[in-house]
Amino acid sequence: MSNSGRGSIAYFALDLPHKGQASYVHINEIVGNLRALGWCLDLFTPRPSSPDRPRNAIAKAFDYVRTMWSAVRALDNHDALYVRAHALAWPVAMAARLKRRVVVQEINGTELDLIVSRPWLAPLRPLLRWLYVSQYRRADHLFPVARELAAWLRQQAGHDRISVVPNAANTDLFHPIERIVAEPFVVFFGGLTDWHGVDVMVDAVRQPDWPRGLPLVIIGTGVRQNLVEAGVRSGLPIRWMGYRPYEEIPGLIAGALAGLIPMTNPRGRSSTGMNPLKLFETLACGIPVVVTELPGQSELVREGGCGLVVPCGDAPALARAVAQLAADPAQARGMGQRGAVLVRAAHSWRARAVEIDQVLCACLAERPRVSA
C-alpha cells in the first residue's frame, strides 16, 4: 500500500479516448488533480486510439483483457479502485470487493448511451443494465455527473451513497482572452455526433431569424460532419475548421458572440441530465451560451444568468436566441462575464477533485486499509 497521506488509487477506465475527446479530458483532469492533492494514483486504461489510426475489434478486445488483468493484479497495492463506469468493468469491480478495497464509480450516463451510439447492442440491453447496476449496488460511493442521473441511481442501486460531481473546466487553459475579431461569430466545438444537435445548428442558420451574414464557426469532426460539409457547399454562413488541438480551442473561440450547445435527446438518452464539458469550457472563456432545455445544463444557465435556453431540437428558436444576443451585445457580454466568474468560483477541475477527495477520505476512514 501507499505511504502517502491520502492513500493509493487504481483508476480504471475502459474508454479508448484520444486526445481532445471529452472522456480523455475528464480522465486526465481528475487523475492530475487528485495527484496534486496527495493521492498516489495509477491509471489503468487501454492504449489511446486516434482518428488516423483506427484499431480493429480484435485488437481492442485484447487491449481490454490486458487492461482488466493488469488492474486486478495491481489491486493488492492500492487502497481504492476508482472506476469510470463501464459494463465490462464488472470483473475488476467484483475483484476489488473481494479484496475489501474501497470502490467508487464515476457515472456519465445509462446503458442507453451505448445503444444510441451502437444500435446493434439493443438486444443486449437487459444484460448491459445488469452489468452496470450490479456494480453500482456494491460500490462504496457513486459519482454521477447530474442530479437526474443521481435520482435514477438511487432507484436502481437501492442506496444513497451518491454525490453529484459534474464536468468542469481547466480554468488555467479556459479563461477570458482579449481578441479583436473582424466580425462577430457564434461557435460550436466538440464531436459532431447524433446528440450534439449538428442538424439543428445547420437548420438554424437557414432560418429567417438568423442574423444576416453572421458566421457559425464549427470546430470538430464526427459521424454527422457530412451535414456541415453540405451546408458549406450550399453557401450557408458556416465555417468548418475540422479537428483542432484541444490546447488551441480557447484562442479560437475567443471573441465569439455566443457558444452553441444544442444537445438533443435521441431515445431519451439525455433525460438523466446533461452537463457537457463544452458548457463549462465556453463559460470559463467569458462567452455566453445557448443551450437546449435539458436537465442539468438548462438549470445552470438559468440560475447563473449566463446564457439562453431554447427548446430541444427547435432550429427556429435557436436562430431567435442568436439574434437576441446579436441585437444586444451588452447583454451578451454581461452573461459571459457572469459565466466566467461562476466557473472559476465553483466549477474548476480542482474543485471537482476536492469533492472526490473528501468522499474517498471518508470511505477509507470507514474501512480500515488492508495490508498487502
Image: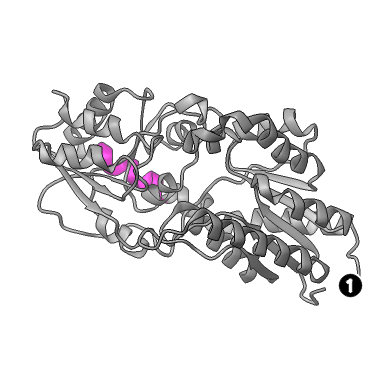
Image x and y of residue 207, in percent: 17, 24
Q: Can residue 330 be seen in this view?
A: no
**Does the stretch in magenta take in 80?**
no
Q: Is the magenta stretch mostly helix, strand or loop?
A: helix
Q: Is 228 placed left or right of 280 in the picture?
A: left
Kindly identify the residue that appears in the image at 59 percent across and 56 percent down: 61
Amino acid bearing label 1? Ala
Residue 215 in which image quadrant = top left
Residue at the image point whose x is 27% and y is 39% from the top: 332
Left or right of residue 298: residue 354: right
Q: In the image shown, does 260 or 192 lie closer to the viewer? A: 192
Residue position marked by numbered label 1 in the rendering: 372
Taking the image as drawn, is residue 169 in sight?
yes
- Label 1 SS: loop
Task: Please provide percent x and percent y for residue 71.
Answer: 72, 64
Where residue 368 appears, as percent x and y from the top left, is 91, 61
The residue closer to the viewer here, 12 or 353, is 12
210 and 304: which is toward the camera: 210
- Residue interval drawn in magenta: 330-340
Q: In which quarter of the image is residue 7?
A: bottom right
The answer to which quarter of the image holds residue 311 is top left
Of residues 36 and 141, which is closer to you in this image? 141
**With 128 as the anchor, is 221 left or right in this view?**
left
